[in-house]
Image (cartoon, rainbow, N blue to C red):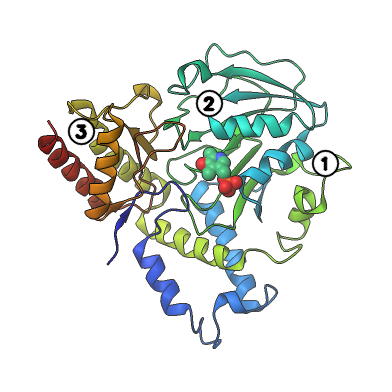
């Protein structure tokens, strides 16, 4: 029996995608083997790789002068790859809005003169600093920010006001809402939240930023080398790329990013509306900065939180325990979470509230 899985990542995948992968697992397209068992240079896999790239370009409206790379190492690897490839002047500014933003900054410090332009740490990252008032240094190579904060449940709705190259970590909101790629120099995302099983990392980078990597940049992290080799410098995460392709097809059939954004807004709306009107459950996140993908909430009583998580699990609503840095609960409602899952969750929260007055 399938449960509604609210895990933050790896996370739930669309059921039709899983069913298709299951059908293909013993015999992919009459080859007598699965896609995970064949050479990454074979015709069937090369076709998968190409179509996945092309569909991601189509879904996100990625212009020709951007390169799309399928790499490994997770978003965390990009915390190092970004400075190794983009630092020319040797300086960059970071906006600290949570755990992953901090990690990116700390990794960056190993490679250059990095500064914190703004931070919401003093309020445990419950808001996004007002982008109108944030100033950046002159002569920087880029401004880095985390678009959606998976742990704290916030998201940027206004981009940093700068002429410098914008670099963003979109691990937990890629393909969930319409984004104008042209505004960015580089977008990266681990695939395991909104796209595919773990193993694949997506990098979308403006081509004029390529070819300036530091001499110490490891070959595998060098975007220009990955670009020149169509991301096939070495063995790629074949199964994740195949699953990403199925997810991209699923998303396209649904109407693409504008269609899923509407659904995501509806899903998040149902959950936030309930929380805002509840006497038991609360959201600590600043309203204007609330994430569409990750919704943390609390009862204010740790024992009651634990009871909620336990009883929800028994009711087929799983992985709702909040991150240890925030406590309480967190519902991750990525693209693949059906609206029925969110409605079931709210129904259960209502019932729990009545029983625990
Ligand atoms: C999950 C996550 C990461 C870490 O991703 P890995 O692929 O595990 O390295 C980084 N940034 C954000 C925003 C995330 O949600």
Q: Position of residue 240 (x, y in %)?
A: 55, 63
The mark nearer the N terminus, 1 or 2, is 2
Question: Is residue 240 left or right of 224 when viewed as pictured?
Answer: left
Q: Which residue is mark 3?
A: 274
Furthest residue toward top: 133
Q: Position of residue 19 (x, y in %)?
A: 38, 71
Q: Where is residue 290, by image quadrant?
A: top left
Which of pointers 1 and 3 indicates the residue nearer the eye? 3
Q: CA distance from mark 1 to mark 3?
A: 49 Å
Q: CA distance from mark 3 to mark 2?
A: 26 Å
- Contact (Cβ within 8 Å) of mark 1 with mark 3: no
Q: Where is residue 112, by image quadrant?
A: top right
Can residue 126 be seen?
A: yes
Going 37% across and 60% down the picture, which residue do you hit? 14
Work out which quarter of the rendered image holds the N terminus and state it. bottom left
Q: Position of residue 246 (x, y in %)?
A: 46, 65
Q: Quick one: SS at disc 1?
A: loop
The mark nearer the N terminus, 3 or 2, is 2
Q: Is residue 8 above or below residue 270?
A: below
- Count residues near mark 3 (Cα–Cα under 10 Å), then give few for <14, some for 14-19, many for 20+: some
Q: Which residue is mark 2?
A: 97
- Count residues near mark 1 (Cα–Cα under 10 Å), then give few for <14, some for 14-19, many for 20+: many
Question: Is residue 290 left or right of 72 when viewed as pictured?
Answer: left
Q: Nearer the viewer, residue 56 or 3?
A: 3
Quadrant of the image where one finds ligand 1: top right
Q: Which residue is mark 1?
A: 213
Q: Nearer the viewer, residue 321 or 220?
A: 321
Q: Nearer the viewer, residue 105 or 270?
A: 105
The mark nearer the N terminus, 1 or 3, is 1
């Amino acid at each position: 029996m399938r449960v509604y899985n609210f895990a933050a990542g790896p996370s739930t995948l669309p059921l039709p995608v899983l069913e298709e992968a299951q059908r293909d697992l013993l015999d992919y397209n009459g080859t007598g083997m699965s896609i995970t068992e064949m050479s990454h240079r074979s015709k069937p896999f090369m076709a998968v790789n190409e179509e996945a790239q092309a569909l991601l370009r189509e879904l996100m409206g990625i212009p020709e002068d951007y390169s799309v790379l399928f790499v490994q190492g997770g978003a965390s690897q990009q915390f190092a790859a970004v400075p190794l490839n983009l630092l020319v002047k040797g300086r960059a500014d970071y906006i600290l809005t949570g755990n992953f933003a901090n990690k990116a900054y700390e990794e960056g410090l190993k490679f250059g003169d990095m500064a914190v332009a703004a931070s919401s740490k003093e309020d445990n990252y419950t808001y996004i600093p007002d982008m109108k008032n944030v100033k950046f240094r002159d002569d920087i190579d880029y401004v880095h920010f985390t678009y959606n904060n998976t742990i704290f449940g916030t998201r940027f709705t206004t981009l940093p006001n700068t002429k410098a190259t914008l670099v963003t970590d979109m691990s937990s909101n890629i393909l969930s809402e319409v984004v104008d790629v042209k505004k960015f120099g580089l977008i990266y995302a681990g695939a395991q939240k909104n796209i595919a099983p773990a193993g694949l990392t997506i990098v979308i980078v403006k081509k004029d930023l390529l070819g300036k990597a530091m001499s110490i940049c490891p070959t595998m992290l060098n975007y220009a080398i990955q670009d020149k080799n169509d991301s096939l410098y070495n063995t790629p995460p074949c199964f994740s790329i195949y699953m990403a392709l199925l997810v991209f097809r699923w998303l396209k059939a649904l109407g693409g990013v504008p269609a899923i954004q509407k659904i995501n807004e509806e899903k998040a709306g149902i959950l936030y509306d309930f929380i805002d009107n509840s006497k038991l459950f609360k959201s600590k996140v600043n309203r204007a900065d609330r994430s569409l993908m990750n919704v943390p909430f609390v009862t204010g009583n740790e024992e009651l939180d634990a009871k909620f998580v336990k009883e929800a699990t028994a009711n087929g609503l799983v992985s709702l325990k909040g991150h240890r840095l925030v406590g309480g609960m967190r519902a991750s409602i990525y693209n693949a979470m059906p609206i029925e899952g969110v409605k079931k969750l709210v129904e259960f929260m209502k019932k729990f509230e009545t029983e625990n007055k």
